[in-house]
Amino acid sequence: MTKGSCWLSMIPVRSEPSSKSEMVNQLLFGDRVTIQDESRGWFKIASLHDSYEGWCESNQVETTTDVIPSTGMLVGDITAVFSSSQRTITLVYGSSVPGITDEFTYQNHTFKLTKGKIVEPHSYNGHNLLTAAMKFAGSPYLWGGRSPFGIDCSGLIQMAFKLTGINMPRDASEQANHPGDYIDLIGESEIGDIAFFDNEEGRIIHTGILTGDGSIVHASGRVRVDSVDHNGIFNKELGIYTHKLRVIKRFNS
């Protein structure tokens, strides 16, 4: 099966091979994929880190006979800039960088870090998970987004875990089924526990990171902090509960 990598800052992944179709996901620089199909200048791809499928324009993915191994290094600022003699690339928080120093070579050009920083993933614990999520604070909500310039609720969870060295599924419903320990009462929750919320049909539709002090970090309109209790998320600005609590889980490394 053909493989590929994302070498643009961000690539929209769509539900159908058309620029007018819905964006369902987003590839960041360094994300690796398998190419499953091709249609009219579009690739059907599956991300290697979570097997999430969708369509992207074929000229936005670099095909390879083998995928360049990930070094585990990530962009540690909201943006980082790499420059060569002919080109500049601006990468967003959490993007994977194919090197263990502040430079890498691509298409015979050496790109050096000129702004920002790259880091190894932080060790996984509740404090580091929350710190990673709070770096997105204020980012606008974007369905399918995974960057500080637009992110959805499950994208926030996935990226926070990525920044602590853990792969998580893409959708909230899939994340809720990821192996972990159930927490029976919200009063027993700790910093870094993940809360999931359902709709009237009982389907998981929302998620966020608990702070351990009666609040939650989540993407709803923007990445924000709201109060949470056994009923769900309470938005003080609106004066209402916006999401109904379904389950709390604690994930292990």
Image: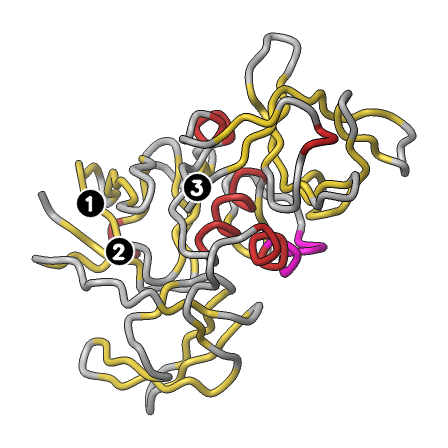
Q: Return the mark for residue 61.
A: 2
Q: Which residue is located at x 55 percent, y 15 percent?
A: 203
Q: Which residue is located at x 26 percent, y 43 percent?
A: 42
Q: Are marks 2 and 1 in contact (CB under 8 Å)?
A: no
User: Disc 2 and disc 1: Cα gap in Å?
Assistant: 10 Å
Instruction: Tell me which numbered mark, 3 or 2, is placed earlier along the sequence.
Output: 3
Q: Mark 3 points at which residue?
A: 25
**From which residue to which does the magenta span run?**
133-139
* Badge 2 density bin: few <14, some 14–19, many ≥20, Cα 10 Å: many
Is residue 123 magenta-colored? no
Q: Mark 1 points at which residue?
A: 34
SS at badge 3: strand
Q: Which residue is located at x 66 percent, y 54 percent?
A: 139
Residue type (three-letter) at the residue carrying disc 3: Asn
User: Disc 1 and disc 3: Cα gap in Å?
Assistant: 15 Å
Residue 170 lies, in percent from the top left, at 43, 37
Q: Is the magenta stretch mostly helix, strand or loop?
A: loop
Residue 161 lies, in percent from the top left, at 48, 50
Please state if 195 lies on the left or on the right of 28 as rendered: right
